[in-house]
Amino acid sequence: MLAIYRREIGAFFTSGVAYVFLAVFWLVSGIFFYNGVIASGTTDTSSMFSSMFYIVMFLIPVLTMKLLSEEKKNKTDQGLLTAPISLWDIVLGKYFAALTLFIIAESIVFIYAFILNYLGTVTWTPLLGNYFAMLALGAAFIAVGLFISSLTENQMASAVVSLVALFVIYLSEMLVSSFENGNRFKKIVYKCVTTLAFYSRYVEFTRGIFSLPSVLFFVSAAFLFNFFTVKVLEKRRWS
């Protein structure tokens, strides 16, 4: 797994994906930081973290689009699949490489916190809670993107489908919001969708609520989609 991890980290920087991802992430998060915190004259970062959900949703597909689709396009996947390593080593090596880059990008919030520390008193507990909530969200989204990347050899198709999938997950809560007071069937649909919702679980943390079930939800979602990716590679190996 470590060999795959090192290889993918190197590929991110040699291909330029890392520089684009970091530059856009830091630029857009900086705009949210200025508009939501500095311009408002507050040290409360909850609005910034709430807005950063959209950065994660739109940029994760860029980060994951080439992880497995490029292997398939370049016909290097068969060499990888027949190597004396487990499929979990392949998947987790690529997964943790993408997660590492996401952590580097996300850690810009600590620079924002030190800036705010000169302007007022920073409450570190909610800030750290929001940081780890965004980490959990990114971990789940990366697993979704990695799974979709395993289904195609076209990087752009992988990015677009991942973005659509994440956007549908985001919109699902809004689409069934009117079902809350409907008949029994609508209420069941509403309950199922909201239980599996990403956005409302993430926003809980931006409101200062630490929810262990939500943390477990994101961890479980990451594991589940990585499991699906392993199954896709397993099928490809034996075909």
Image (tube, helix red, strand yellow):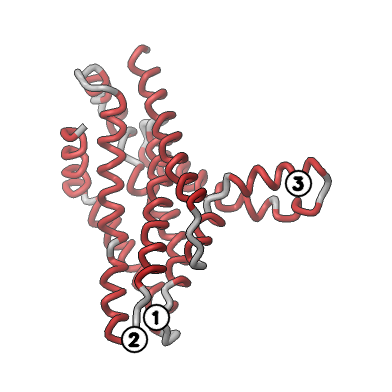
Disc 1 versus disc 3: distance between alpha carbons? 39 Å
Secondary structure of residue under mark 3? helix
**217 vs 43: above or below:** above
Q: Quick one: which residue is furthest to the top in this view? A: 238
Q: Give the image location of residue 109, x and y in percent.
A: 31, 68
Residue 43, which numbered label? 1
Q: Amino acid at mark 2?
A: Gly
Residue at 39% across, 80% down: 43
Q: Disc count in the image?
A: 3
**Comes first in the chain, label 3 or label 2:** 2
Percent x, y of residue 205:
48, 62
Kindly indicate whether the residue at mark 2 contacts the one at mark 1 (C-beta within 8 angstroms): yes
- Give the mark, 1 or 2, whose residue is nearer the N terminus: 1
Which residue in the structure is indicated by mark 2? 120
Q: Are marks 1 and 3 in contact (CB under 8 Å)?
A: no
CB of mark 3 within 8 Å of CB of mark 2?
no
